Image (cartoon, grey):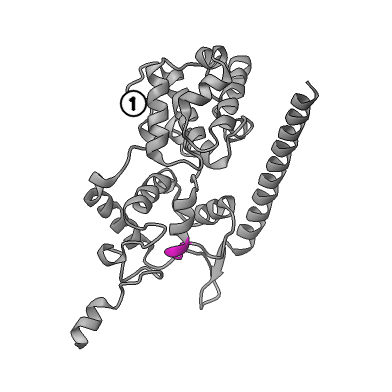
Amino acid sequence: MSKYFEKKSEEQKETINSTENDINNINEATNIVKKRRKVVNDDGNDRKWEPPHWREHWANILAMRITNKHLEPRGCDTIGDTIADEKIRRLHVLVSLMLSSQTKDTMTIAAMDRLLERGFTVQYALDIDVDELAKIIYPVGFWRRKAQYIKDTCQILRDKYNDDIPNTIETLCALPGVGPKMAYLAMDFAWKSNQGIGVDVHVHRISHRLDWLPYDTKTPEQTRLALESWIPRDLWNQINHNLVRFGQTQCLPVRPRCSTCLNRNICPASTSKDTTKHLKQK
């Protein structure tokens, strides 16, 4: 029994430390953005910073998504398309985002399909044994921990939200296992509310490669605030979905397909800029 309480105490400390780190990162990022949000023109007038060629970058990314459509895996944005009950649909969206952390989309979707087959609801999560739930979502990353997060979250949804999910960033982030990226995407996918940019590894990586950031960022929260400082708000809810798909099919983490990328001549990180010029010289 003592080991159980020791384990619980360690988990609580880990959660508190994680929350404090998130708050510190947010505060640090906010201060940086406030300092560097504007640059000065030659005439001395302030203007909002924005990267060169970004509109062309964006148009090309959208065009490549059409070309590479057959390569794209299903994502969390498609979860719940067949569910008529809005509360249950939103629940499935939230759970899929919780499972997606450190997990490939194909594994996340497979796990969600298994939960859908079993009629997953808040009541189902409360009734099922945590070890049995863990077996169902396996092999998503950190499957044992996520199974407990799901059960704890569903208890909160029962107690506080009438089996629905919260509808603000703050209340979503207060749920076990839910971070800022998941919260912003949940607001978009579940509530159809454009509150901010969900930044994951793909968005973070591609933003740096395209020089879309006015300064170097270390954390997803810093990247989110830096992007939101200049990207038009009506595009915020389109950034994650399109950059993630672009990062999965074209701008890969290792060996990006620069030679077939429409941005190859205007991307600072491109390895294929001079191909045509080199051939002409020959």
Q: Is residue 204 above or below residue 189?
A: below
Describe the element under mark 1 as helix, strand or loop: loop
Q: Is residue 237 above or below residue 54?
A: above
Q: Is residue 245 left or right of residue 163?
A: left
Which residue shows up at 44% across the image and 64% down it? 209
> Residue 253: x and y, percent?
42, 57
- Report the number of discs: 1
Q: Which residue is mark 1?
A: 81
Q: Is residue 67 above or below residue 51?
A: above
In the image, the segment drawn in magenta is 208-212
Q: Is residue 87 left or right of residue 40?
A: left
Q: Who is closer to the viewer here, 108 or 37?
A: 108
> Residue 155: x and y, percent?
61, 18
> Residue 5: x and y, percent?
77, 25
Which residue shows up at 23% across the image and 44% down it? 70
Q: Is residue 255 left or right of residue 48?
A: left
Q: Who is closer to the viewer here, 32 or 123?
A: 123
Q: Is residue 210 magenta?
A: yes
Q: Quadrant of residue 158?
A: top right
